[in-house]
Amino acid sequence: MVSTKVKLCSLELDNPVIPASGTFGFGYEFAELYDINILGSISLKGTTAQPRFGNPTPRIAECPAGMINSVGLQNPGIDAVISQELPKLAECFSKPAIANISGFSVEEYVECCSKADKAEQIGILEVNVSCPNVHNGGMSFGTSPEAAAEITRAVKAVTTKPVFIKLTPNVTDIVSIAKACEEAGADGLSLINTMLGMRINLKTKKPVIANKMGGFSGSAIFPVALRMVYQVYEAVKIPIIGMGGVSSAQDVIEMMLAGATAVQIGAQNLVDPYACKNIIESLPGVMQEYSINNLEDIIGGAH
Ligand code: SIN
């Protein structure tokens, strides 16, 4: 009998598989398809202080082995998430969830995180300093070690739950940003968010996406994500949630060997809404195939 359990800061997860923010709504939408309590946890839709309509359409471009999105942080705002979305999730999910928080100023991150921190259902705060689809916010905080550290310190000052900073791959040196977040008090890191990309429509000869560019995700980016998790694991002591093109139980194991304690599944949920279920169900068999008895033992095993 193999063990898929992992410990992520104070949380004991039945398995390391977590749907990534923005690909799984607020979780309850998927409860129509299967019992979502099989998931390790859920990273909820990215949330800001105020409700946001998001970017103009088209917001999606298909690519071989991936997709580009420019959603622009569409969400109902932190107060509605707490008063309306979390109660719906509570009806079908009994484990701690991950609040994914974005903002346009230090004050906004502080406001949202301190509210989410007080919600009983929230076990981890994932602070998104890496959204490539908004101006003067999101990724602009995650491309400088100083700005990422400032957000980390400010959020840590008003929260009690583990704070994971979600990093962008759209930088020259992700390790320096990871280290700055660790030094500023982050309890963990989530990486990677999407890679900035674009497509051009040959008929119109214009960008496919109204916002011109967006975040590229999907299995095509897996080797880049894996490389960054591997590099960051060598440089920090705090746990890593690895993500970026993870599509199978084999990919989960590879991510953990690179250094991830837990693994998020993103674009694959949009290809197949049963992706997380299928990965969780196939993990024990794949572990046996590679003589792995305890998933926790393999974290960072490739180093
Ligand atoms: C979005 O809403 O634009 C995607 C969120 C993100 O990439 O962080």
Image (cartoon, helix red, strand yellow):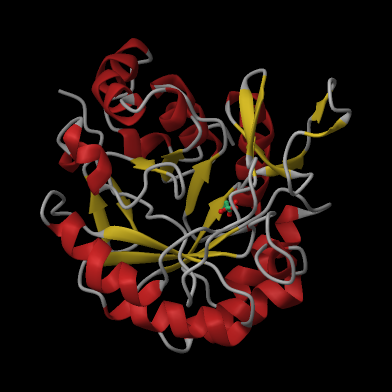
x 27%, y 39%: residue = 15
Q: Is residue 10 visible?
A: yes
Q: Nearer the viewer, residue 217 or 255?
A: 217
Q: Residue furthest front?
A: 204
Q: Quadrant of the C terminus?
A: top right
Q: Tell me which corner region of the image, top left, top right, bottom left or bottom right, holds residue 286.
A: top left
**Tag count in the figure?**
0
In-image side of 175 versus 255 (left or right): right
Q: Residue furthest right?
A: 205
Give the x, y percent position of residue 213.
Answer: 77, 44
Give the x, y percent position of residue 302.
Answer: 56, 31
Q: Nearer the viewer, residue 109 or 209?
A: 209
Q: Is residue 160 visible?
A: no
Q: Is residue 209 above or below residue 233?
A: above
Q: Is residue 300 above or below residue 247?
A: below
x 24%, y 22%: residue = 281
Q: Quadrant of the N terminus?
A: top left
